[in-house]
Amino acid sequence: MSLSVEPFADAETSKEAIFRATYLAQVEHGFSDLSIQHIATEASLSKSTIYHHFESKDALLKEYARELLEWYIDAFLLEAENDPIRQLEWSLDLVFLGEAEGGVSIDDVRPPGLGCVYMGLRMEATQDREMREYFDNLDRVARERLKETIDQGIENGTLRDIDSEQVAAVLYLMLEGGLYFRSTQNDTAWLAAVREMIDAYLDRLKTDP
């Protein structure tokens, strides 16, 4: 899996450069206090240049949020590589143990400040119906990605004939919960015990050796 150091780090278009500046400005100022001036300063652009690409601050932030959240999914859900169990365990280890196979740590896929940015967007969704719709779509895509992985395991015989949509929902809730606690607590050692319980759950889904 190829890992980007930070979202929009390899910006190739003017929009992506503005999204990059928005991300950096949000890390520093938070979502609710973010202004076009903050973004313009971070991007070394004039406010008028930003308004050339986006008709309003709201339009910019909505499109930025969509792009960031899609990047977020890709960072934590490994692409299938003919081994769906390994894919699931890679993502679970990353979240609950802080490190996955190959020595990849959670900080390799979650740069400093991303947790705060993500939590800020989730908080915004409690008051903003349109942001909530973005999270509806984000969560639906993430669950579908997990379902596809589980379906692959059923097809190749490593998983039993199970309700893949239901299992994907359970695993996604576990992953989101694990990320929430890892982002908001200093004491995360107890998450290792949760990871063991998830292993027991996965073992019940696997076919007999």
Image (cartoon, rainbow, N blue to C red):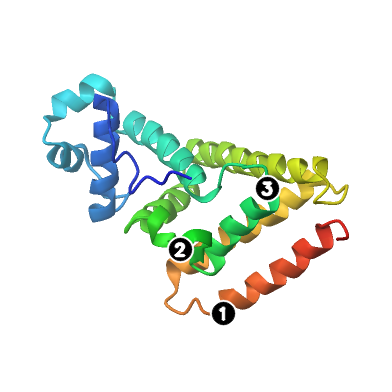
Disc 2 element: helix
Sequence-first tag of 1 and 3: 3
Sequence-first tag of 2 and 1: 2
Q: Is residue 150 above or below residue 36?
A: below
What kind of residue is marked 2? Gly
What kind of residue is marked 1? Trp
**Residue carrying label 1:** 190
Classify residue 207 as left or right of residue 55. Answer: right
**Residue carrying label 2:** 103
Q: Residue at x 64, y 54 (%)?
A: 86
Crowding near the residue tagged with mark 1, few <14, some 14–19, many ≥20 C-alpha atoms within 10 Å: few
Q: Nearer the viewer, residue 13 or 139?
A: 13
Q: Nearer the viewer, mark 1 or mark 3?
A: 3
CA–CA distance in space, label 2 to label 1: 20 Å
**Residue carrying label 3:** 83
Q: Is residue 41 above or below residue 28?
A: above
